[in-house]
Amino acid sequence: MEVRDKLWRDYKTTGCERARERLIEEYAYLAKYAVDRLNLSPSGALSREDLIGHAIVGLIDAVEKFDPGRNVKFETYALSRIRGEVIDVIRSLDWAPRSVRKYEIMLRDAYARLEMELDRPPNDDEVARYLGVDVAEVERMLALVAQSALLSLDETIASGGDVTAPNGFQGDDPASSAERSEQKRLLAEAINALPDRERMVISLYYYDNLTQKEIAEVLGVTESRVCQIHTKAVLRLQGKLARTSAAFALAA
């Protein structure tokens, strides 16, 4: 830790290039960690090595812009910027087919509308009936969305539940800050209301920082099943936050 503190002092006070390079080396593991947590299946356009390369670009940007004087851990700051860099390049290549985006919208709408009607999270049978398909088809849709979509609770908070908002977008005015605070409060309540297994996956992934592979070992299920559970939970939470954003807009 003392070595890193000295490197930060040397780089930020004198602009020492060697200190900058050493900092990038010290934190290079964050690039691999961020890509692994995204749990993406590389496409023909991008290999895992390509994704890590773009993650390194995000890491370099984080090192250059980080202010050690602020009360924020570099790892927390860097992971957000690294993830944003990787997602930006993936989106620029239209990573997911239109059919998968369609499934994502359909599922999010189904979870949101049914929860309003039932006053509780709907189960798979209820979602299937709403969509006019069987449970096996709902699971297939979830699996496709889980493999191809870039769903994240962090991004959901940052965009205020608006999944069309730019990655990491946040307003700086007092009204936006108040809205985000309220959204986070409501999100905490929404997480507590999730079905047990979904709540556990969200907790292990976002609060305990386990990878999906590690969560699979804890729960005794496959990694693809964890990915599916995570996707279902985030879709539920996105729908709830989107309704909150709409209510704010109507009240404004």
Image (spheres, helix red, strand yellow):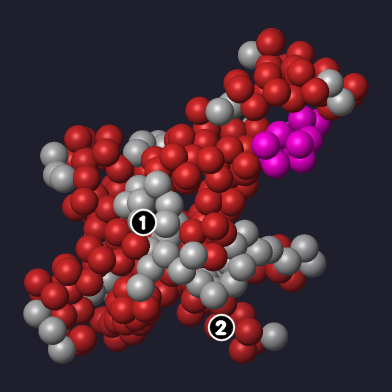
At x 32%, y 73%, the residue is 100
The residue range painted magenta reads: 60-70
Image coords of residue 17 (percent x, y): 80, 23
What amino acid is found at the position of numbered circle 2 in the picture? Ala
Kindly indicate the quadrant of the structure image that contains residue 234: bottom left
What amino acid is found at the position of numbered circle 1 in the picture? Gly
Q: What element carries label 2?
A: helix
Q: Distance between the residues labelled 2 and 1?
A: 42 Å
Q: Mark 2 points at which residue?
A: 247
Query: Earlier along the polypeptide chain: callout 2 or callout 1?
Result: 1
Q: From this viewpoint, which residue is outermost toward the front?
A: 44
Q: In this view, does 114 lie above or below 169?
A: below
Residue 187, magenta (yes or no): no
The one nearer the camera, 189 or 236, is 236
In the figure, is residue 49 to the left or right of 92? left
Image coords of residue 180 (percent x, y): 63, 63
Query: Is the Cβ of the residue at disc 2 closer than 8 Å to that at disc 1?
Result: no
Image coords of residue 117 (percent x, y): 29, 86
Closest to the camera, between mark 2 and mark 1, is: 1
Q: Is residue 156 visible?
A: no
Q: Can residue 121 be seen in this view?
A: yes
Q: Quadrant of the N terminus?
A: top right
Q: In this view, does 196 lie above or below 35?
A: below
Q: Is residue 94 above or below residue 224?
A: below
Q: From this viewpoint, which residue is outermost toward the right?
A: 14
Q: Mark 1 points at which residue?
A: 44
Q: How many marks?
A: 2
